[in-house]
C-alpha cells in the first residue's frame, strides 16, 4: 500500500527531479523537485522523532515560505493530518483550534512562541516548534539533524490528509476533514481542466493556510510537475514584472483590481500568460470586462469552498461568461434545489446548491450531528450557497443562504441589489444585508463604498427606484471607506450586520 496523495506527487515527478524548479522566491532561492523530496523526507523524520504518529494532527501557524509547503507534504508522508492556521489569528483564537483539534505538534513563528507556547500547553499539545518566513527555527533545525530518506507511511484514499477550519462567518469555525483522495482527485481534475503541463510556471501570491493557495494552487502544480514563482503576498508591481516569465496565475478579485491600477498592464505585458483564474469571492463583471479590454485575456472564474475543494469551472476552451462560475467539473454532480423540500428547481430559478463527488469532504471534525445535517440521504452536500443554472448550463452564485433577506414576506437576494448599485457611476462596491426591522422582519440595507464624486443616499435610492421592485430597494443606504473582509477577500457581512444591528430600532 502506498501513501495515496504523495504517490500522486511521485507519479508526476520530472524525469530528472534535480533539473526542474518547483519553487522560486523573490529573494532568489530556488528549490528543485529533488530538493522537495529531500526536505520533505527530513521533515517527516523530524516529525516522527517528535512523536507524531499516523493520524495525529500537526498544526502550523507560520508565515508563507517554501518550508511550510515542505512541512505540509512531510506531514502527509508521515501519515499525519495537516492543520494550517491563518497567520492573523490571535492567541485566543488559536487556543480554540488547538483545544478542538488536539494536535500532537504545533509549529509557530519564533516571534510568537512566547505567547503561543502556554496556549498549546494548556490545550495538551505535546510539542511546540518554530519556523519563520526565512525557513529558520527549531522545526527546521530538527529537520537538519535528520537524514532525507523516509519510507512514506501507507495511507488509503479515505484516510485524513488535512483539517481546514471554515471561516466562521456564523458561529464557531468547524474543522472540515479532507481525505487523501479529496486532495488527489481534485488536483488531477484541475490539471486536466486547466491544461497544466510541466512547462507551466504559476505566479503564486496567495496565502497557504487556505484551500485556494495550498490545495488548488500548490497541489495542481505538484500534480503536473510545473513550477511556481512563490511570492510572500500580493504585490501588483512584482506580479506584473514576473508575467514575462510565467504562464498562469491564480488569484482573488483583489489581485485583478490592483493590477488594473498598474499603468504597465497591457496585452504585451501579459503575452506569455495563458491562464488567469479567480475565485474565493465574486468577481465583478466590470472587472472581467476591464481585464479583457486591457490584456485580451478572459479571466476564468470557478467555484469551490473549504468543504469541497473545486466543484465547477468556466471552460478553458469555450466562452467564459462573466458573473458565472461555469459548469460542474468531471466526476462532480451538482444540483439546485428548493431549500425546504429538496426538490430540484427549474432552470433560471434560485435554490440551494448541492454537490457530490470525490472532491467533497468527509465531514466536520468531531461534529457528527452537524455533519449529518449537512448531507442529504443520497450523499449530496448542502453547500449553503444559493444559485441558479441558466439556460446554457452555467452556474450563477446568488449568495449565501444565511445572507438571504426576508422582508415583509418577500425574498431578496443581495447580489441582485448589489449588481444594480455597483453599476452606478461613482460606486466602487457595495454589500447588501438584512437588519432587524419591527415592521418588515428584516430591512434591506446597503453599505456602499463610493468615490469622492459618488452618489449620496438619495441618489442611490432614486437610481434603484426604476430598476428594482420596491420591496427589493434598500430602506437605508450607509456609506463606508471600505468593506470588512477575511483573509481571502470575502466580504464579512456578519460584521456589517453586527455593526449596524440597531439601525432600525425605535
Image: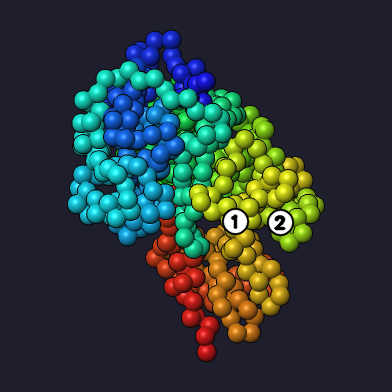
Q: Could you tell me which residue is drawn at 42 percent across and 49 percent down?
A: 101
In the depicted view, which residue is nearer to us: 151 or 213?
A: 151
Q: Which mark is residue 351?
A: 2
Q: Foreground: 369 or 323? A: 369
Q: List x then y, in percent, for residue 329.
A: 64, 35
Q: Secondary structure at mark 1?
A: helix
The answer to whether the residues at label 1 and label 2 have Cβ atoms under 8 Å apart is no
- Residue furthest out toward the bottom: 506
Marks 1, 2: nearer the viewer: 1
Does label 1 or label 2 sit earlier along the sequence? 2
Q: Is residue 362 above or below residue 14?
A: below
In the image, what residue occupies the spot 31% across and 26% down?
A: 45
Give residue 124's mark.
none
The crowd level at tag 2 (other Cα within 10 Å; few <14, some 14-19, many 20+) is many
Residue 168 image offset from top left, x and y in percent:
47, 58
Residue for point 29% across, 55% down: 122
**Percent x, y of residue 210:** 44, 44
Residue under numbered circle 1: 369
Amino acid at each position: 500500500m502506498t501513501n495515496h496523495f504523495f504517490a500522486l506527487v511521485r507519479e508526476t515527478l520530472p524525469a530528472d527531479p534535480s533539473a526542474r524548479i518547483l519553487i522560486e522566491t523573490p529573494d532568489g532561492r530556488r528549490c528543485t523537485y529533488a530538493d522537495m523530496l529531500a526536505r520533505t523526507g527530513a521533515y517527516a523524520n523530524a516529525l516522527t522523532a517528535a512523536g507524531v504518529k499516523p493520524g495525529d494532527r500537526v498544526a502550523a501557524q507560520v508565515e508563507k515560505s517554501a518550508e511550510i509547503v515542505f512541512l505540509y507534504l512531510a506531514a502527509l508522508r508521515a501519515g499525519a493530518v495537516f492543520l494550517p492556521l491563518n497567520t492573523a489569528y490571535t492567541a485566543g483564537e488559536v487556543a480554540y483550534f488547538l483545544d478542538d483539534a488536539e494536535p500532537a505538534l504545533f509549529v509557530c513563528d519564533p516571534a510568537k512562541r512566547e505567547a503561543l507556547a502556554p496556549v498549546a500547553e494548556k490545550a495538551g499539545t505535546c510539542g511546540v516548534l518554530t519556523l519563520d518566513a526565512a525557513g529558520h527555527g527549531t522545526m527546521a533545525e530538527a529537520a537538519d539533524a535528520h537524514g532525507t530518506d523516509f519510507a512514506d507511511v501507507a495511507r488509503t484514499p479515505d484516510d485524513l490528509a488535512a483539517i481546514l477550519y471554515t471561516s466562521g462567518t456564523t458561529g464557531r469555525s468547524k474543522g472540515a476533514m479532507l481525505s487523501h483522495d479529496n486532495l488527489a482527485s481534485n488536483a488531477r481534475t484541475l490539471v486536466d481542466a486547466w491544461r497544466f503541463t510541466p512547462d507551466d510556471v504559476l505566479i503564486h501570491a496567495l496565502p497557504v493556510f487556505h484551500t485556494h493557495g495550498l490545495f488548488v494552487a500548490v497541489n495542481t502544480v505538484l500534480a503536473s510537475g510545473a513550477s511556481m514563482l512563490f511570492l510572500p503576498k500580493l504585490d501588483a508591481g512584482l506580479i506584473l514584472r514576473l508575467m514575462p516569465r510565467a504562464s498562469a496565475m491564480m488569484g482573488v478579485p483583489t489581485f485583478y483590481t490592483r493590477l488594473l491600477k498598474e499603468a504597465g498592464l497591457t496585452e504585451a505585458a501579459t503575452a506569455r500568460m495563458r491562464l488567469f483564474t479567480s475565485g474565493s469571492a465574486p468577481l465583478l463583471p466590470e472587472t472581467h470586462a476591464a481585464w479583457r479590454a486591457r490584456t485580451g485575456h478572459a479571466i476564468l472564474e470557478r467555484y469551490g469552498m473549504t468543504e469541497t475543494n473545486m466543484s465547477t469551472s468556466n471552460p478553458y476552451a469555450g466562452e467564459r461568461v462573466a458573473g458565472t462560475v461555469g459548469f460542474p467539473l468531471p466526476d462532480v454532480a451538482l444540483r439546485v434545489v428548493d431549500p425546504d423540500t429538496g426538490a430540484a428547481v427549474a432552470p433560471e430559478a434560485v435554490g440551494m446548491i448541492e454537490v457530490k463527488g470525490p472532491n467533497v469532504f468527509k465531514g466536520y471534525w468531531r461534529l457528527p450531528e452537524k455533519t449529518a445535517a449537512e448531507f442529504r440521504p443520497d450523499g449530496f452536500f448542502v453547500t449553503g450557497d444559493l444559485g441558479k443554472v441558466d439556460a446554457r448550463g452555467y452556474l450563477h452564485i446568488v449568495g449565501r443562504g444565511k445572507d438571504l433577506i426576508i422582508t415583509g414576506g418577500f425574498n431578496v437576494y443581495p447580489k441582485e441589489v448589489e449588481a444594480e448599485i455597483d453599476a452606478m457611476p461613482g460606486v466602487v462596491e457595495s454589500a447588501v444585508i438584512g437588519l432587524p426591522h419591527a415592521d418588515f422582519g428584516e430591512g434591506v440595507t446597503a453599505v456602499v463604498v463610493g468615490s469622492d464624486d459618488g452618489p449620496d443616499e438619495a441618489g442611490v435610492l432614486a437610481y434603484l427606484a426604476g430598476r428594482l421592485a420596491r420591496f427589493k430597494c434598500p430602506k437605508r443606504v450607509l456609506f463606508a471607506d471600505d468593506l470588512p473582509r477575511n483573509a481571502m477577500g470575502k466580504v464579512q457581512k456578519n460584521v456589517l450586520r453586527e455593526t449596524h444591528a440597531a439601525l432600525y430600532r425605535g
